[in-house]
Image: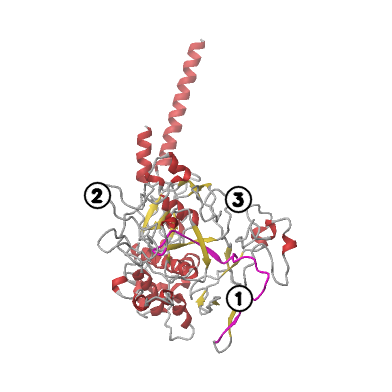
Amino acid sequence: MKKHFIKVVLSCAVIVGSFSSCKNSSSSSSKNVSRATGWKINAKEGGFQYNSDFKEQVTPPGTVFIEGGTFTKGKVQDDIMHDWNNTPTQQHVQSFYMDETEVTNVMYLEYLDYLKSVYPPENPNYKNIYSGALPDTLVWRNRLGFNETMTNNYLRHPAYAEYPVVGVNWVQASQYAEWRTDRVNEAMLEKEGFLAQDAKYKVLNGEIGGTFSTEAYLNNPESVYEGQIDSLQGKQKKDSINSFAKRSSGIIMPEYRLPTETEWEYAAQALIGSREYNNYRGRKKYPWEGDYTRNGQRVGRGDQLANFKQAKGDYGGIAGWSDDGADITAQVKSYKPNDFGLYEMAGNVSEWVADVYRPIVDDEISDFNYYRGNIFLKKAIGEDGKVEILKDEIVYDTLPNGKIVALNLPGEIKEVPVDEQETYLRTNFSSSDNRGYRDGDPGSSRFFERFSDESDSRKMYDAPKHKVERDSTGKILRQYDTSNYRTSLINDEVRVYKGGSWRDRAFWLDPAQRRYLPQYMATDDVGFRCAMSRVGSKSKTKNKTVRHKKAK
């Protein structure tokens, strides 16, 4: 009797289990049916619309994929300069994309040409947009050196087209990344049929006013191209449900930006090609394997692996022998890439990164995507409940060196600092500006008030504050800080730059080295490259599939 009862129970369980299994597989097999409600997704009748066919993020133009992981950030070799500003910490980096080369002259000239065409300098409202983006070509000049050829030719002559752009300060590099975001997304929308073919060129040719802003398109698409987007819509306009792309469409890419210092150093080390324990613990000296700057392989043995200053008065070696192939900068891709496929992560030019400089990187604050420089903003909402679009309200800023730059372009969304509405009872952030958090703000030291005097703004980092402004006639008024109480050159507008350059000795080729400059300054040996965060999986789908197969 007991055996018969058990058999009946098991049979029922099998039947119920089979029924549940079939039911679940049926419901989950359809990607256009909600597993939460059973409703249709992407139905022609309407309802919830979502890109259920999305596979993974497309590799952005000009970049390579950097798979994230852990590494030792900082320097564990002898610190002969005694800077003590790069002590080792263990960090984890999320996957991202990075330009395979530095931004070149021809890439930057495309940006300048766009600004000049869309915002003509002869228009009084726009006159400082183009001039504010121009690199400082006078950085090549030297009191006791003849460099006028570079001053006049380096930026625009086709002979230097594929050389890294220099003379660009941190502010200009960041604005280039913002512009690039909009141009790439504009092209993506055109490719997917949300914008008409060659719509982007109508703006350049003056056939239509305004321009495209990614955030404006996502939040208020009718405002793009000065409200004329209807005339520029592509084949998707036939479908009233999907006339505009949304973030859920999976087409809009995240923003281009400067890489964080942690990302840059991780990408330069390229530990993906090495499984040596010492390298993993931070002992890797250069972006390539080995402790020397010359190629030790059979092919190309003895060739220099980077463009750097080899000795006093020696920027390239003896002509025709032992030469690194360059005296000033070199054409990008002149040297072998590292194991991530990135070129010239040591030598050629140093590169701006996003971080505000501090002498200490505190690993107790964050060991995941460490970055100092966060200023949290929110979109300004108008009385009509919609985001505010800046039309001709261009805000300019006069940098300490007198250069005027536009803080926003027409058609962009107005942003304002977060306030108590966003910070109330939060534990992860309590203010908008976090550049000085735990190192320079009132919370940095219990004795902060002793060192803070409002009369001369003395505090932990009390760099000189030079006041620069322009009067109604455009004349620059400069007021130098003559205080005798300044003790530092560090403030919240000083940025990190990484990597050695053509002017540096081999010591600076170590990816862990870090230096800083005010964000408004430019030199003839500092350039930049862009990065973009990866959304979704840590690894590419192909790699993930291979890993699963091996596991089986």
Q: Position of residue 325 (x, y in %)?
A: 29, 62
- Helix, strand or loop status at disc 2: loop
Q: Which residues are drawn in magenta?
A: 475-503
The alpha-carbon separation of the residues under discs 1 and 3 comes to 32 Å
Disc 1 crowd, CA 10 A, few/some/many (<14, 14-19, 20+): few
Tell me the quadrant of the picture where the C terminus can be found.
top left
Amino acid type at circle 1 is: His
Q: Main secondary structure of the magenta part?
A: loop
User: Mark 1 sits on what residue?
Assistant: 466
Disc 3 crowd, CA 10 A, few/some/many (<14, 14-19, 20+): few
- Helix, strand or loop status at disc 1: loop
Amino acid type at circle 3 is: Ile
Q: Earlier in the sequence, mark 2 or mark 3?
A: 2
User: Mark 2 sits on what residue?
Assistant: 299
Res 365 label: 3
- Left or right for 449, reference 151: right
Note whether 76 is above or below 471 in the view shown. above
Q: Quadrant of residue 29?
A: top left
Q: Quadrant of residue 134?
A: bottom left
Whether the magenta-drawn stretch holds residue 381 is answered as no
- Left or right for 522, reference 333: right
